[in-house]
Amino acid sequence: MAVNQACSAGKRERWFVAAKRADFRAIAEVFGIDPVTARIIRNRDVVGEKEIFNYLHGSMEQLHAPELLKGAQEAAKLLKQKIEAGKKIRIIGDYDIDGVNATYILYRALVRCGADVDYEIPDRMKDGYGLNLHLIELAASEGIDTILTCDNGISAMDEIAFAKEAGLTVIVTDHHETRFEDRAQERHYLLPAADVLVNPKQPGCGYPYKKLCGAAVAWKLVCLLFELSGIPVCEAEELLPFVAFATIGDVMDLDGENRILVKEGLKRMAVTQNFGLRALAEANGLALSDISSYHIGFVLGPCINASGRLDTARRSMKLLLAKDIQEAKQLASDLKELNDERKALTQQAVEEACAMIEGGLYQEDRVLVIYLPGCHESIAGIVAGRLRERYYKPVFVVTDSEDAGGAKGSGRSIEAYSMFEEMVKCQDVFTKFGGHPMAAGFSLERERIDEMRRRLNAHCSLGEEDMLEKVSIDVPMPLDYMTEPLVEELQLLEPFGKGNEKPLFAEREIRLQSARLLGKNQNVLKFRVMNRSGRVMDALYFGDTAKMHSYLTAKFGEEKVQALFWGRQEGLTLDLTYYPSVNEYMGRKSLQIVIKNYL
């Protein structure tokens, strides 16, 4: 099964079956799993008995020692000295989900160690990302001795140089890519002159796993600080729910060590005594015992992010630090309202951008640089992500900033395009930038937006094949093979997310017997389907229902589609990719599938 599928405007898909080889029956026998599950594990590039065991049953014992992080021991010792000397320490985090959780982890830990500590989270609109001169001047004027960053700092060369001139001690904990320059075919890394740098991506760091988020780096430092301070390191495990929250929310790969951190964090989240997390789950109609990576990524996480986008991230910190449930409930309700407002603003901006793109102006661009002056700058990244999903191209969304003549924005990329490295090629266009291969943030002068668009496209080497979204099917599995025990066994593969996607199955020529729209906003399509051997079950589609309806109408004609919604079978068939699930209603269980792609 390898086909191209025309979907939304400008976006196509290539379906293919993952063909990685192994003795699936032998693996199934050793680990007591179905051969289908064994095949999925192999498709995640997990090979060897030790690695498979860790993937299925990995625990805290498999985590790498925090001492392996370059600078971590030195940072822990320096913090201990500052605490014992009664020096004032200020944590400077970031306004997103990773920065807020990292700030919380460090603040809780330093308070536990008896530190004279406070925190500052930059205002997205006034301060921008990470360290800036205003925050450093403020710290110096308020008698702060030591600045401890989290989820930022690795690119703050000028700001940290200024802090050192002001007599401040600076400890950086970060996970972002380090800036570099290519000189005479040799790469030179540009690092700030902090007292200590802790970042698994810095040159010379031998830490075996490089994909930690900022909160995870902060947590590793806390483990060392607790050990030095005579505090049982097991107390640090109480902070794992916030590491998991940040890892999922910052869209880190859920493989290797991240997989263990998230699994262990979710376990502890189910029984957490943190009033803020409990209230946030309740405000969104969720029980903490049922929280999965999906709920953090798409329900709870956006509420934490919303405060940093439309208000101040200090509100999210107040939620996590709430002293009683009543305070937490009020803060959680406020954050949910902010997130609902953010959703409406996002939809409006996405529609405006789509109208511009589909109007033809950007038709030849392989890299989309979309200027939306009226878009709230805090949602630029979300809008870029939605456009990336729709068109499957790298997308930069640029908005006006409060600075006179200034603009800022966010980018979201596709697998074949390293956003950070491509920005380095024209770094003189930006006044400030940083990020990952898949995402970036930046500032520039407004009159240089067209130049940014022109130069990024001139440097772009993406080919047609790179801009086909690849849909990797784990197993072409008939509906007949699906059983409740298999669906339950697939839960062993959780948590799902980037780098460990939900397994994807596929079957050709599935007959649609009936269809109806569900949900308050009619945003769910429910089909009754039957495969070629006569297996019948429900199939749900949670994607763009209007687009799917248009596709069906174009493929089969309006009359036949209308008959389908009236429950009259008209022999309409689709090739589907899907994920199986068990529906439980009034004590009765039934198998169903969730449709992901259709052709």
Image (spheres, grey):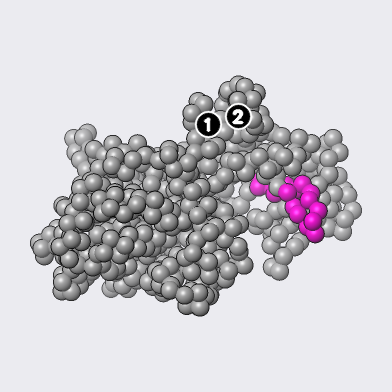
Please give the name of the residue rendered at 52% of the width and 53% of the height, measured from the top-left corner: 266
Return the x and y of residue 339 as percentages of the image width and height.
Answer: 51, 70
Point out the frontmost of discs 1 and 2: 2
Q: Residue furthest right?
A: 568
Q: Secondary structure at mark 2?
A: helix
Residue assigned mark 1 = 52
Disc 1 and disc 2 in contact, CB within 8 angstroms: yes
Q: Is 163 one of the magenta-colored residues?
A: no
Please give the name of the residue rendered at 60% of the width and 34% of the height, measured from the top-left corner: 40
The answer to whether residue 133 is left or right of residue 100 is left
Looking at this view, is 367 or 408 the one in front?
408
Please give the name of the residue rendered at 28% of the width and 73% of the height, measured from the top-left corner: 404
Return the x and y of residue 86 as percentages of the image width and height.
Answer: 17, 66
In the rendered image, which quarter is residue 519 located in? Answer: bottom right
Which quarter of the rendered picture does the N terminus lie within?
top right
Under mark 2, the amino acid is: Phe
Q: Is residue 453 visible?
A: no
Looking at this view, is 546 or 328 the one in front?
328
Return the x and y of residue 487 as percentages of the image width and height.
Answer: 69, 42
Dominant SS in magenta: strand
In the rendered image, which quarter is residue 181 located in? Answer: top left
Looking at this view, is 442 or 216 the one in front?
216
Who comes first in sequence, dot 1 or dot 2? Answer: 2
Q: Secondary structure at mark 1?
A: helix
Q: Which mark is residue 31?
A: 2
Q: Which mark is residue 391?
A: none
The answer to whether residue 337 is left or right of residue 78 is right
Q: Which residues are magenta?
A: 582-599
Which quarter of the rendered picture does the C terminus lie within?
top right
Alpha carbon distance from label 1 to label 2: 9 Å
Under mark 1, the amino acid is: Ile
Q: Is residue 292 visible?
A: yes
